[in-house]
Image (cartoon, rainbow, N blue to C red):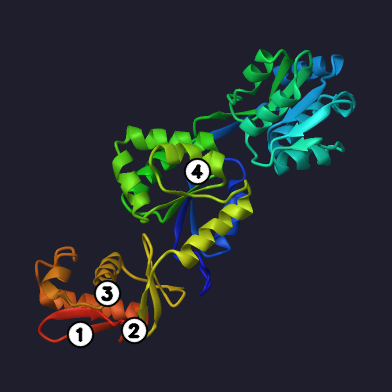
Amino acid sequence: MSTPGEPLAGCVIVITADRRKRELASALERRGATVVHAPALSTIPHLDDARLIEDTKRLIDSPPDIVVATTGIGFRGWIEAADAAGLVDDLLEAMAGARLVARGPKARGAIQAAGLEADWVAESETSSELRDYLLAEGVAGLRVAVQHHGNGADGLDEAFEAAGAEVQSLLVYGWGPPLDPRPHAEWVDHAAAGRADAVAFTSAPAAQSWLACVEEHGLMDAMRARSVAGQLLLVAVGPVTAAPLIEAGMQVGFPSRWRLGALVRELVKHYAETVAGVSTPDGMLVMRATSAVLDGHVLPLTPSGLELLRALARAGGSVVTREQLSDMLPGAQGSSHAVDAAINRLRENAGSRDLVRTVVKRGYALAVSIA
């Protein structure tokens, strides 16, 4: 349950991540959000993969000149796999004489955790910057070991081989379809229908998988329209993850660097600074996808009450007629008594008799404070 004043109170946020989803969910829930897990992909570990162990043995037998670490979780997984196979000391010794290059601080942290030091870290945290740096330095005739992330399709192997290097790939984990595809598909539909406030992405492959489902369901135009209009926030962990969404014409928010904490701050900043509310005598009223927040409190409204309040908030203090409100009540059939009863329940659930004004012989209006 949300505590009054929490910045994400009332927000429904869909997490498309498989890895570190609990860590992200916990950070969002502490700030008041309702979190839905709907992974767009699953992570396939290779820690027991015979191929990874054989590749590690080959690297030990022929130590590399350069080791490229593309992700922290992948590099750590590689060390763990070598440890399980009794090869970790030999692997670390083989890497001790190599130049260690990291695709960002997470990979550098994993290198340091293994007792090694990174010689260079890509400031942009992109494979393209890492590739350009090493090609400029020259890799002809060198042995380059590349620890890959995801499905390994980042173009590093091909670029280094074309420049004359001998490349050895080490794939520590990969991507597969979601273990349960139903939440993924259902929440794509819900997001397009306005039942989610935000969708969070922590990897480019997950963004691509989510877009493929949007396209398959015929919702690309609707999703694009909602994101551009600010009705659905799409937020990515960084520019690399955001790229597929931007290419699809979506409006995407993202921090400049890959961090889960920065992603959470991006969401908090958006809802604290961007989302407009209506000032009332009872405090600021903010409408979320499936709730209403008044003065920091999520109101316990019925679905009908939420729709009535949403219509009144859209009117911004102008009168909404009983006839217009009656159309939002199931089975009301134009009954003014049903509208009056629904407004009274809305007032009671909101804890304020003054939130909604009765305009005699005309209808109802939200009580709006004039600045």
Q: Nearer the viewer, mark 3 or mark 1?
A: 3
Residue 358: give its label.
1
Disc 2 target residue? 369
Task: Point out the image quarter for the C terminus.
Answer: bottom left
Q: What is the C-alpha distance between the residues marked 3 and 2?
A: 10 Å
Q: Is residue 2 above or below residue 171?
A: below
Residue in the picture at 24% in, 72% down:
315
Badge 4 amino acid: Thr
Dots 4, 3 in contact, CB < 8 A: no
Residue in the picture at 59% in, 26% down:
154
Which mark is first along the chain, 3 or 4? 4
Q: Secondary structure at mark 2?
A: loop
Q: What is the C-alpha distance between the residues marked 3 and 1?
A: 15 Å
Which mark is first along the chain, 1 or 3? 3
Q: Nearer the viewer, mark 4 or mark 3?
A: 3
The answer to which image quadrant residue 311 occupies is bottom left
Task: Please state if 295 lies on the left or on the right of 72 as rendered.
Answer: left
Which mark is first along the chain, 1 or 2? 1
Badge 3 amino acid: Gly
Disc tally is 4
Q: What is the C-alpha distance between the residues marked 2 and 1?
A: 16 Å
Q: Nearer the viewer, mark 2 or mark 1?
A: 2
Residue in the picture at 82% in, 40% down:
112
Residue 316: give its label.
3
Q: What is the C-alpha distance between the residues marked 4 and 3?
A: 35 Å
- Indicate the position of residue 215 as horizontal and vertical percent values: 34, 34
Which mark is first along the chain, 1 or 4? 4
Disc 4 target residue? 16
Say if residue 172 shows up in the picture.
Answer: no
